[in-house]
Structures are given as C-alpha cells and as structure tokens.
Amino acid sequence: METIVIVGASLAGVRAAETLRTNGFAGALTIIGAETHMPYDRPPLSKNFLAGDWEADRIALRKADDLSALNINWMLGTSATSLHTDSSVVTLADGSQVPYDGLIIATGGLVRRLPNQPDIAGVHVLRTLDDATALRDELAEGVRVVVIGAGFIGLEVAATATKRGARVTVLEGLEAPLIRALGAETGTAIGAVHARNGVDIRCGVQVASINGDQCVSGVTLTNGDTIEADVVVVGIGVAPATQWCSDSGLTISDGIVCDANLNAGPANVFVAGDVLRWPNGMFKDIEPTMRVEHWTNAAEQGAMAAKNLLATLRNEPMEPYSAVPFFWSDQFDARIQFLGRAFESSTVDVVAGDVAAGRWCAMFSTNDRLTGVLGVSMPKLVMPSRAMLSTYTSRYDALQHFAAVVAAQNK
C-alpha cells in the first residue's frame, strides 16, 4: 500500500492522517476537501466565532507546522464527484482522477434546506466557516432574527444572536425543541432556558414561505402568521454527504453502511465521522446501526478507520469500534452534556437538581437498561456515568447509583 487518500478535510480526516503517520505509514498521503480552508473546528462556529469572540485562526484544528510535519498532499477547494471501487479511483469535479491503494471517507454532512428556500440576502445556513462569517456580519443590536429549527445548531445560534442584542424567534415543527435528540420532556425543559433569556420559541408550527425579493423580509407560517425578519437562519439538520459515491457499489442508507470495523465492503475502503453508519456494539441490541454527528465520535472513528486500514495491509486483526456517544452544547448559562443514546421508547428519570431552576441531571432507560445520561450544568454527574453506560446497567441499579451520589454530595 503506497498511496492512501482521505476524502474530507475534516476532524475525522485529520485524525485519520495523524494516526496513519504515527502508526508507521510512510507512503503518499492525500486529503481532498471541498472547502478552500485548512481543517478547522466546527463547534465554535455557532458559539465563540459567531459571537465575535474568536477569529478564524483560533479555530484551526492544528498548527501549520504540525500539519506540515504529516507530509500531506492537500487538494482543497475541489469536490469528489464519484468513486470507482473496482479500479480504486476517486474522480474530482474538474474531471481529474486520484488513484488510491487505501481510502478513508470522511465527507461529513451537508445542510438540509427547505423546499423552495430562496437565495436572497439575509437567508443563511450554518455549516462552514464561510457560512458563519456571512451570518456573523449581519448580527447586531436590534436585528430581528428568525431561526427555523430548534435542534442544537438552531438553539446555539439563537443563544449567540440574543447575546449580541438581536431579537430572536425560533420556529420548530415538532412539539418541543431537541425532540429527536432528547425527547419531548427534556427538550421542553431546555427550551425554557431560552424563554427565560428572551427567546420566543414557537413549537408545532410549519413554515409556508420565506419572504422577500432581493432581501429577506420575514417568514410566513401555514396558519397565516407572518414574523418579520432581517435575518433568517435555516437550521433543520444535515444529511450525510454520500451523493458523490452513490454509484460506487457501497451500501448507502442515511450514511455509508459499514461493519463494526468501519469497513465499507471493499477491503481497502473505510469510513469515519458524520457520514458513517455502523453497528455500535454498545447499543446494537436496541439500534442495529447508528449514525452519530458528534465531535468525539468523528475524532475516534478517524483514528480507528486508519488503524484498521493499516491492519488490512499488515494482515493483522482489525478492532471493532464500539463507543458511548457524547456531545455537549453551551446555550446561555447552561452547559448541556449528554452521554449515550435517547430513544423514543426511553423512560426519563430526573435524578438530581431542579428542572425549573435550570440545573438538573436526568437518566434515560430503554428496555430496562440505562442508555443515556443528560446533564444541564451538572458535569460532575454526567461524565462519571460513562462506565455504567458501557456495562449494561439496569434502570434500578442506575437509580440507586444516582441516589447514593446525590446523597453523598448533600452531606
């Protein structure tokens, strides 16, 4: 194996490159990226960077010297348009072809857009550094902002815009914020954090149109209401970036479907990050395959994909990737942390704190087993729970554990 290509100049892609080099790969290493920027960290885009507290150099994933030491052939500002696994070639938008002996796919996700979303001034999405820069330039004191979508990105944008003095309305089609990630009860509680800080959150509403000719003027709902706006942010989630390899022979179903070793089928093709769907051994009895859009998973999967690709070269056994997902989100004065998975059928128990006061911890149990722990400004209860999530702890045992911890803290 003389040439390894990584498609995606992302966190997962960079971690894969670093792991290849630290594990002895000395051959040619190429990273293909659609953006012109060197790899950067995405979480600050909706927070510190959007707030104007940080500039672009602050969110670089690695120092220039560290990346230079990896001896990577960077092909930035160009998109992969097709993948030929039979001949081991990636085709780019300009028609050129990049051959590989080993391939790691880390293309991440693409923002979803509303049907007939207008391309006019003041209408934004947020996924890239360029997106965040354009939106930041329009946030100012008194600006009327409408955020469509009350997921994590939408709520983080709402919090940041409010702190900058904007008047923010959040529109959500479902009955509560964050319902897909955390369920209705806890999503409603987190929505209350925003309400206390002046954000107008409207759930159970549908957008009929975004209005304006050359510049946005407002949003009309299907019930006839119109909310005036100077800025509209469409934050309705992302879709895995798989279009470019749709004819590759890989299995694609809301992501590229891989085995537990992150292998996509052909022996020399591995996948990592938001674009990956795989059987997570921690939860496959409940969720046969999953796709996780979290920073920690992208970093860990990038490293594991690289290790397993090298293992195939060296005829060594591969290591399955099994993990407890983890994400965090800062919104106003609340630090939201979640370990594990929440399912529609999960039972939610508040085990510490006070929801009304905006500081609490809740556990999620599915099939009488602990599957998730949520903390709102309670980090000391969340992070130590990883061991219980890894060992199939029963709901009863988890409740006893939290009761004992809280009692000890209250002494």
Image (cartoon, rainbow, N blue to C red):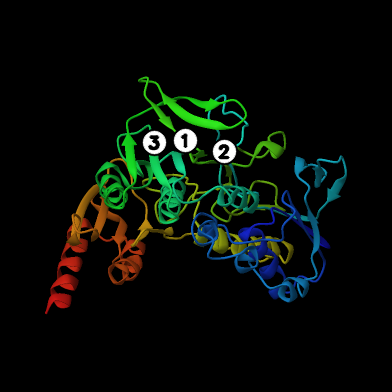
The quarter in which the N terminus is drawn is: bottom right
- Specify whether 340 is left or right of 93: left
Residue matched to label 1 = 229
User: Circle 1 sits in a helix, a strand or a loop, which is it?
Assistant: loop
User: Circle 3 sits in a helix, a strand or a loop, which is it?
Assistant: strand
The image quarter in which residue 123 lies: top right
Separation of residues labelled 1 and 2 (CA atoms): 9 Å
The quarter in which the C terminus is drawn is: bottom left
Residue drawn at the location 27% of the way across and 53% of the way down: 364
Residue drawn at the location 33% of the way across and 47% of the way down: 182
Q: Position of residue 261 (x, y in %)?
A: 57, 56
Q: Residues within 10 Å of mark 3 (few under 14, many from 20)?
A: many
Q: Position of residue 248 (x, y in %)?
A: 72, 38
- Specify whether 303 is left or right of 159: right
Residue drawn at the location 21% of the way across and 56% of the way down: 395
Residue type (three-letter) at the residue carrying disc 3: Leu
**In the rendered image, the vertical position of residue 239 relative to residue 272, given as above or below:** above
Separation of residues labelled 3 and 2 (CA atoms): 17 Å
Q: Earlier in the sequence, mark 1 or mark 3?
A: 3
User: Circle 2 sits in a helix, a strand or a loop, which is it?
Assistant: loop
Image disc number at residue 171: 3
Residue matched to label 2 = 122
Q: Residue furthest bottom?
A: 411
Q: Position of residue 51 (x, y in %)?
A: 50, 58
Are the residues tagged 1 and 2 within 8 Å (C-beta)? yes
Q: Nearer the viewer, residue 384 or 204?
A: 204
Separation of residues labelled 1 and 3 (CA atoms): 12 Å
- Specify whether 312 is left or right of 332: right
